[in-house]
Image (spheres, rainbow, N blue to C red):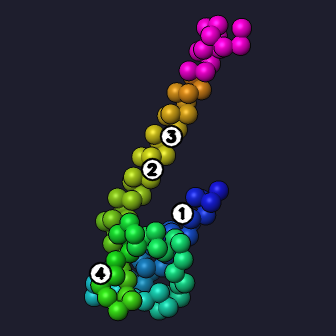
């Protein structure tokens, strides 16, 4: 739940930068110009290189890096889904094979 809220907050920040056209060093903007208050989601984006600071408290969106981060998240989500399915199948097999519960 918390992760979903953080992702939603990060997407909203990214959308604000895209709408403002702040996608390069030249078009970098301050948080106050974008009517944003930096918080955890903001600082996570900075830490991951999605928001870059060329100086003077101005930031811009690195779209390529945002796509990489999004792709990594999707990949990790699929790995977790496959792992859970494999675990459920293993437990089912153990139970029906007489290994558990008999």
N-term mark: 1 or 4: 1
As measured in the structure, the alpha-carbon distance from the residue carrying label 3 to the one carrying label 4 is: 35 Å
Report helix, strand or loop for mark 3. helix
Asked whether the viewer can see residue 22, the reply is no
Total number of numbered discs in the rendering: 4
As measured in the structure, the alpha-carbon distance from the residue carrying label 1 to the one carrying label 2 is: 12 Å
Q: Quadrant of the N terminus?
A: bottom right
Residue span colored magenta:
90-102
**99 lies above or below 45:** above
As measured in the structure, the alpha-carbon distance from the residue carrying label 1 to the one carrying label 4 is: 23 Å
Residue 85 pos. (x, y %):
55, 30
Q: Measuring 35% from the left and 69% from the top, which residue is drawn there?
A: 49
Q: Which residue is mark 3?
A: 80
Asked if labels 4 and 2 touch by Cβ distance under 8 angstroms, the answer is no
**36 lies above or below 86:** below
As measured in the structure, the alpha-carbon distance from the residue carrying label 2 to the one carrying label 4 is: 26 Å
Q: Measuring 35% from the left and 86% from the top, which residue is drawn there?
A: 28
Instruction: Determine which of the numbered discs, if any, sits on residue 74 in the image.
Output: 2
Residue 69 pos. (x, y %):
39, 59
Pointer 4: residues within 10 angstroms few (<14), some, or many (20+)? some
Instruction: Determine which of the numbered discs, if any, sits on residue 7 in the image.
Output: 1
N-term mark: 1 or 2: 1
Report helix, strand or loop for mark 2. helix
Q: Which residue is mark 4?
A: 24
Asked if labels 4 and 1 touch by Cβ distance under 8 angstroms, the answer is no
Camera-side mark, 3 or 2:
3
Residue 42 highlighted magenta (yes or no): no
As measured in the structure, the alpha-carbon distance from the residue carrying label 3 to the one carrying label 2 is: 10 Å
Side of 91 relative to 65 (left or right): right
**1 lies above or below 28:** above
């Amino acid at each position: 739940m918390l992760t979903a809220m953080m992702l939603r907050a990060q997407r909203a920040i990214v959308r604000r930068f895209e709408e403002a056209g702040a996608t390069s060093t030249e078009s970098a903007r301050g948080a106050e110009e974008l009517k944003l208050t930096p918080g955890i989601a903001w600082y996570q984006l900075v830490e991951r290189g999605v928001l870059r600071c060329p100086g003077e408290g101005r930031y811009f969106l690195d779209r390529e890096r945002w796509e990489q981060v999004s792709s990594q998240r999707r990949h990790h989500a699929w790995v977790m889904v496959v792992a859970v399915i494999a675990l459920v199948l293993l437990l089912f097999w153990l139970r029906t094979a007489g290994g558990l519960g008999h």
